[in-house]
Image: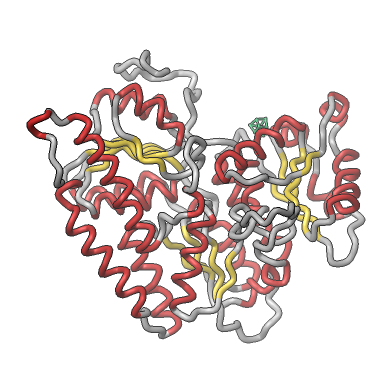
Amino acid sequence: MLDCTPKEITERKSGGMINPAKTCQPIGAMYAALGIHKCLPHSHGSQGCCSYHRMHLTRHFRDPIMASTSCFTEGSSVFGGGANLKASIQNVFHIYKPDVMAIHTTCLTETIGDDVSSIVKTADVADGKFVIHANTPSYVGSHVTGFSNMTKAMVTYFAESTETVKKDQINIIPGFVNPGDMREIKRLVESMAVEYIMFPDTTGVVDSPMTGEFEMYPEGGTTVPQLKDTGNSQFSLALGRFASSDAADLLSKKCNVPAVVLKTPIGIKATDVMLMTLRTSFSREISKELEVERGQLVDIMTDTHFHFHGKTVAIFGDPDIVTGLTEFVVSLGMRPIHVLTGTPGGSSNSVAGSFEDDIKAILEPAGIEANVKSAGDLFTLHQWMKNQPVDLLIGNTYGKYIARAEDVPLVRVGFPILDRSVHSYLPIVGYRGAMRLVEMISNALLDRADRDAKDEDFELVM
Ligand code: SF4
């Protein structure tokens, strides 16, 4: 328990983390790889890393996560893992028969310096089968960086510009979000009658239905022909700069497909921006269905605003999600006074910017002063909350220890959520996702008000 976290904030000279607000790169790379149809993620490292990554994803999605490993022993750690990887490539295609094997590295193989790229280039792979790879050293970045790196690898290995005139379609790079969110983004785009390729796409993979039969490779995922065709699209919609903009930027350089980088469409404003981008680009009208949904959301926000107005909130998690949540709760009249991500500052490409700048651009016009930090840890967040208490905490499951220590309600949003279920099926993006967030946040606040109310203040109607 975290009851002993000191209130006094002292400078940590070692610069180390206490209670990290992130996890390691390969988890994100493994999740991204699952968004390719008939793909087996492969962890180039020891069995322990692979087990941990699979387990973490399995616990979040409550679905079995398939992946293979190079099974390092002491010998491969000393002499290098090239032989293990070559044997793995042969074994994986022979035994598990994927269309794509997506290799990511681990701390150990990055430290040894295994040249995965050369091994992949010289691998003996049958026609119609593919091996791709991403370098994912876990002592750099976070699981979001790993997701971004593997998504970028899909462009590196597959994207081709084969048409003289770009096709009437777009690429959608949804970022590190749940399959429920990907489904919702697809529904929004389909309602605008816009042709698209989403990659990666984990719908139908980590949320596949129970059929009574085990399927090594469920129906979902972006196919290889679709990945190749991303080079022929009008533009790429990168939703969330940290998880998606690197791949979009590479597509721009490699295939001359312009990148449009938007926020993850959490809340009314970000969803409006995404839909208006499509409307302007393709001269499509917003569908009646979406107009109604938006109107319902505005009605709900109006009906409930007095529950939210002036309430203070601490938000932590992945940068794209936290940015979207911050913008949305400000639109509800809440005051995010502590905002933190464990993922470091910005990504490497030309369209990226800093997390702190993004959050300040949201908070300053609303006159809100806040503690904002990237590459932070939960120890820091906890200390902030001790010094400036909040009415609500929003973040992943790891926030429950702080919520318990400070007796603050927690709304679980983000990755990972290990102590609740169903979350990965339901969206937080789009107008419907925003309705769900309003329900989750207001229920948490009202449950707390009920719990704390004296008998004479205990209300039936709230
Ligand atoms: S050793 Fe590195 S790659 Fe493996 S689980 Fe730990 S942080 Fe992740």
Whether residue 176 is situated above or below residue 161 in the rendered picture? above
Whether residue 328 is situated above or below residue 253 in the rendered picture? above
Whether residue 333 is situated above or below residue 274 in the rendered picture? above
User: In this image, 209 relative to 451: left or right?
Assistant: right
In the rendered image, the residue lying farthest to the top is 4
Q: Nearer the viewer, residue 219 or 430?
A: 219
Q: Quadrant of the N terminus?
A: top left
Residue plotted at (37% across, 62% down): 432
Residue 170, horizontal then vertical, whole percent: 54, 74
Q: Quadrant of residue 10?
A: top left
Residue 197, horizontal then vertical, whole percent: 59, 71
User: In this image, 144 relative to 321: left or right?
Assistant: right
Residue plotted at (37% across, 65% down): 271
Residue plotted at (40% across, 18% down): 2
Q: Nearer the viewer, residue 65 or 102?
A: 65
Q: Is residue 370 visible?
A: no
Coloring applied to the structure: secondary structure
Q: How many marks?
A: 0
Q: Which image quarter has ligand 1?
A: top right
Residue 407, horizontal then vertical, whole percent: 29, 25
Q: Is residue 315 visible?
A: yes
User: In this image, 223 relative to 377: left or right?
Assistant: right
In the rendered image, the residue lying farthest to the left is 456
